[in-house]
Amino acid sequence: MIGNNIIELEETFSTNRYALELLSNSRISEGTVISVVNQTSGRGSYGNFWESEKGKNLTVSIILYPTFLSFEKQFMLNKVTSLSVYDMLVQINSGQEAVMIKWPNDIYTDNKKFSGILIENTIIGSTFKHSIIGIGININQEIFVSDAPNPTSLKISTGKTYNLKECLSILCSCFNRRYTQLKNFEFKTLDEDYLSALYRMNKSALFIFQKQLITAMIKGVAESGKLLIEKLNGEMIECDFKEVEFVI
């Protein structure tokens, strides 16, 4: 289903914004992918800018209608998307540095960022109307000029140049598998796979929490999506997005 319909654009402001405009006019088939060669104002999480050199990377949005999913489990979409990109990069990047998911949904290798994800849900009452899954993956870009602290790409990691259409095909296949798991309510599998790939899981590391530097260990993720970390004194903390900062 994912990628059966692909809308290919030469240039657009943002694939998520383009998808939202499509949805405002008609019902688009689920699994439709919007892919663009040049995204001029890509957005990351929390309003951050997503840098992508023209024709070098994957910048896509996927339209979903997860009406079967309860409002309380909306973080499962983060897990599905993160695991889809993770699966794709592991498949393509076989034999290279370990690929990991940095909570909530960045994809890392060797403390550097491969990919960012922006999920925008429209919910009426407690029911999903639609979801737009924005994904940016650095594939062939070698020089980054923004102030992003630690970007990398497949080409930097492996020294190889990749075919973007083949990469997109693999991503769609991986996403289709993970989304099918979600539709089949295989929450335990998705939870376990997400935690097994989680960056710094069960490893002592430095974090900034409430403007203080702490040493703690990631112990899991709550159903709400909050990060569960344990301080050296045994105190457990639930951290919402932007409440905690990884020291890298």
Image (cartoon, grey):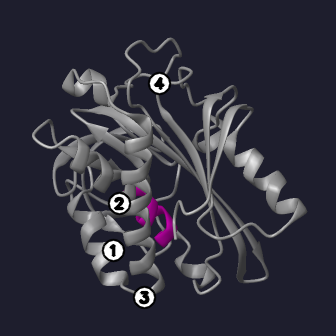
- Foreground residue among 69 and 1: 1
Q: Which residue is mark 3?
A: 184
Q: Which residue is mark 1?
A: 190
The three-letter code of the residue at mark 4 reads: Lys
Task: Kindly indicate whether the residue at mark 1 contacts the one at mark 2 (C-beta within 8 angstroms).
Answer: yes
Q: Quadrant of residue 215?
A: top left
Task: Kindly indicate whether the residue at mark 2 contacts the one at mark 4 (C-beta within 8 angstroms).
Answer: no
Residue 191, how many percent across, how many down?
Answer: 32, 74
The three-letter code of the residue at mark 1 reads: Leu
Tell which circle, 2 or 1, labels the residue nearer the N-terminal end: 2
Q: Which residue is mark 2?
A: 83
* Quadrant showing the C terminus: top left
Instruction: Check disc 1 and report its element: helix, strand or loop.
Output: helix
Measured Cα–Cα span from mark 3 to mark 2: 16 Å
Tell which circle, 1 or 4, labels the residue nearer the N-terminal end: 4
The three-letter code of the residue at mark 3 reads: Asn
Instruction: Check disc 3 and report its element: helix, strand or loop.
Output: loop
Instruction: Check disc 2 and report its element: helix, strand or loop.
Output: helix
Residue found 51% across the figure and 49% down from its top: 243
Q: Is residue 189 magenta?
A: no
Q: Which residue is mark 4?
A: 56
Vertical comparison of 80 with 43: above or below: below
Report the magenta residues as a range. 76-82
Tell which circle, 4 or 3, labels the residue nearer the N-terminal end: 4
Horizontal relation, residue 104 to residue 196: left or right: right
Measured Cα–Cα span from mark 1 to mark 4: 30 Å
Residue found 55% across the figure and 25% down from its top: 51
Task: Kindly indicate whether the residue at mark 3 contacts the one at mark 4 (C-beta within 8 angstroms).
Answer: no
Mark 3 packing: few (<14 Cα in 10 Å), some, or many (20+)?
A: few
Tell which circle, 4 or 2, labels the residue nearer the N-terminal end: 4
Tell which circle, 3 or 2, labels the residue nearer the N-terminal end: 2
